[in-house]
Amino acid sequence: MKRWLPFVKSDPTVAVVRLQGAIAATGRGMLNDQSVGPLLERAFTKGKPDAVALVINSPGGSPAQSSLIGARIRRLAEEKEVPVYAFVEDVAASGGYWIAAAADEIWLDATSIVGSIGVISASFGFHELMERQGIERRVYTAGKDKSLLDPFRPERPEDVERLKGLQAQLHETFKGHITARRGAKLPEDRDLYTGEVWIGQQGIDVGLADGIGHVAPVMKEKFGDKTRFRTYGPRRPLIGRFGFSVVDDTLHALEARGLWARYGL
C-alpha cells in the first residue's frame, strides 16, 4: 500500500532477470535478443526499480546476439537511470561474459567461471571419407568464395586465412566492449584476451569481476534489509509444452551441450 500513499517512501525494489542458457539466434531455451528483450524491457520499466540484477549462467554462443543483448541492457540502464548488477552462477564465459560486462558491477560465486574472451570456429573434414566411399561432391557457385571452408573438400589455406581475418574483427569488437566496460579495473600488464578462463577470486584479481556475493545479500547490503525482489524469466512457448519441434530442439540441445562441455559442465 505504501506506493499509493503520498509522502510515504516505498521499500526498495530490485528487478531480477535470469539469463540462463547458450546464446543463439534461434532455438528453444537459447538466449537471444528476441526472447530476452521483452524481459529486460519489463524489468527496467515496471514499478520503477531501484536496480536491475542479472543472474547469468551462460557458456556463450552467438557474438551478434551477445552484442545485441548487451547493448539493450546499456540503453535501458542509461535511459531509465537504473544501476545494473550481474551475478554469475556456474559460468559467464565468452558471450556470457560479454553480457555480464554490460552491468555496472559483476559478482561471482567462489566457484564461478568467467572469461573466455576470444572467438572460436569448429568444423570437420569429410573429403577423404567421401573418396574412400566413392562419393562425388558437386557444388556450383557464382563467386569463388561462396563455398568457403566447405567440409566436403580439402581445406584451402586462403579459406583459413579469410576465416582468421573474420575472427580477428570479432575479437577486436569483443575486446573493445570489455575495455570500455571494465576500463581502469583491468590490469595494464596482463593480456586477458587470450580465451583463458578464471574461477572465483581469480576473476576478481584480474579485474573481470568486483566481488564474491549472491543476489539477495548483496542487494540488501546496498539498498537495505527491506529490499523487495521482482523476478522475470522466460515463459515456455505453448508449442514446446506439447513436445513439438523435437528435431530442432535436439539439434540446438546438442550445440548447447558442446558449449557447456568446454567448461566441464
Image (cartoon, rainbow, N blue to C red):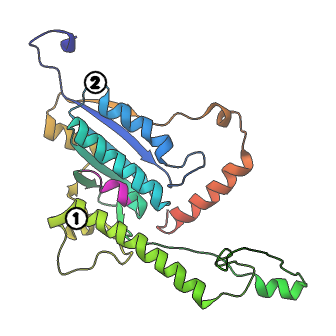
Pick the front one: 231 or 73: 73
Which residue extends farthest left? 7
Of the numbered discs 1 and 2, the one sitting upstream in the chain is: 2
Per the image, the residue denoted by label 2 is: 47
- Residue range corresponding to the magenta coloring: 97-103
Horizontally, residue 134 falls left or right of residue 261, namely: right
Instruction: Name the amino acid type tagged 1.
Output: Ile
- Residue located at (29% from left, 75% from top): 192
Residue 101 magenta: yes
Q: Work out whether residue 60 can be spotted.
A: no
222 vs 257: above or below: above
* Res. 109 mark: none
Mark 1 or 2, closer to the camera = 2
What SS does tag 2 mark? loop
Residue 144 magenta: no
Q: How many marks?
A: 2
- Residue located at (17% from left, 77% from top): 188
